[in-house]
Amino acid sequence: MKMKKLHVLLATTLLIVITGCSGSDPTPATKSWGTAALIETDNAGGAGSPQVAFDASGNAVAVWYQHDGTRYNIWSNRYNAVTGWGTATLIETDNAGNAFDPQVTINASGNAVAVWQQSDGTRYNIWSNRYTAGAGWGIAALIETDTAENAYYPQVAINASGNTVAVWQQSDGTRSNIWSNRYNAGTWGTAVLIESDNAGDASYPQVAIDASGNALAVWQQSDGTRYNIWSNRYNAVTGWGTAALIETDNLGDAFNPQVAIDTSGNAVAVWHQSDGTHTNIWSNRYTAVTGWGTAALIETDNAGNALIPKVAIDSFGNAVAVWYQYDGSRSNIWSNRYTTGTGWGTAAPIETDNTGDADFPQVAVNASGNAVAVWRQHDGSRSNIYSNRYTVGTDWGTAALIETDNAGGADSPKVAIDASGNAAAVWRQYDGARPNIWSNVYR
């Protein structure tokens, strides 16, 4: 159980916000990865857990946590499509306790929202700050006020109108529950409980929001015997509905749910689930008209466990899922694509380097359906960051190394993509003394 939770913790994932309009990207051959660059220069302490999001114009916002010699803080940097990365900025000033696990989301206009967990010296709370295009970051604010127990692992999603939904797990002293708060009309509302099953802990929620402000949350929850995948929907008019189970396979535990939603409110969820022998990748689809369908297996390679899936979706409802999977000798990066009206295709590996394990992939998809994946891959000496690109009508390309600093291992990659197919990757990398935050841009 400890290892399963570790897998989920390490996979804290970024939510992909789909921006821009439909149509083809510029010719892929005109774009390439640049040179990896450090995006923070504070050497007081280590930095980690980077996240990144891209707006429709090719501007990006990255966030991470960083130690100042006394405590961990939340920092951010902004990438300007013309001038590149700016100067890293502290976005919270509460010195009561450590701040961890930042997440960031951005809309087409370049307005962004970051959330994180932060200790007040007694317990962890959920905080947020908002970046307004043309004005910068505001003042960090507490978005939950339950002082009974700790709140952890926030996730956040924003739509084109700026409506934002955050979710997190919070203990009531007996078990962990899933809570949510909504930002609308310039202010956060009141946090609410969105599940009421008291059989066991609910944890690691994810959330996505559509153009109309409707949202879907998913999470893993114990029934006292095994972990299942649950969901609840926020209706922009009536509020949260009733939580429902979205998978019914009772052979083994289901963990690490992820969800992505298109502009019309159709969504795809993925997770990994044990069949009693090994772990597989499963999916279910939500349609705005009929609700959740029936969960389905989206990979059939039984050589070894498949773990930690991620999913992103385009404006037409087509989705791309990635995960890592063991072949009996090493772990590889695999992908499958969901096509609206057709369903899931055939899972296939998207990297062929057999030197060492490849794991913890992330994926981003733009409105046109073109995708970029990144992952960590070992070369026998150290871990590196690799990427591959999916082009509509062409399929996946050839995996490429996107960083060449051999001072220390690189891990925790994240990626975002804009409407034109430009992408930004961020990751943590050791320099021999401390971990730093690095980035590379595909354009």
Image: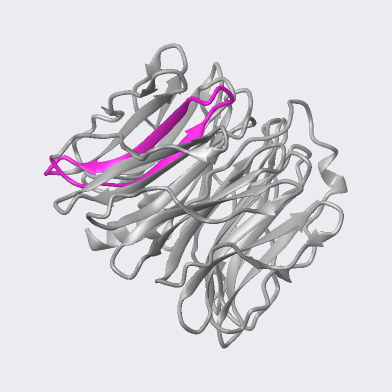
Q: Is residue 395 left or right of residue 101?
A: right
Counting labels gives 0
Image quadrant where residue 194 sits: top left
Foreground residue among 368 and 68: 68
Is 215 one of the magenta-colored residues? Answer: yes
Q: Residue furthest top?
A: 289
**Which quadrant would the N terminus be assigned to in this image?**
bottom left
Q: Is residue 120 left or right of residue 132?
A: left
Q: Is residue 311 visible?
A: no
The percent coordinates of residue 402 (x first, y second) are 70, 63
The percent coordinates of residue 185 (x first, y second) are 56, 32
Is 353 one of the magenta-colored residues? Answer: no
Q: Is residue 390 left or right of residue 67?
A: right
Q: Is residue 290 visible?
A: yes
Above or below — where is 401 with respect to 139?
below
Point 63% across, 79% down: residue: 42
Point 53% across, 44% down: residue: 15
Above or below — where is 283 with respect to 70?
above
The percent coordinates of residue 81 (x first, y second) are 82, 51
Q: How is the image coloured?
A: one colour
Q: Is residue 257 left or right of residue 268?
A: left
Foreground residue among 97 and 179: 97
Point 85% across, 59% down: residue: 83
Above or below — where is 325 with respect to 215?
below
Magenta stretch: give its range: 199-225
Foreground residue among 148 and 223: 148
The percent coordinates of residue 191 (x first, y second) are 36, 40
Point 74% across, 39% down: residue: 56
Above or below — where is 350 with respect to 48?
above
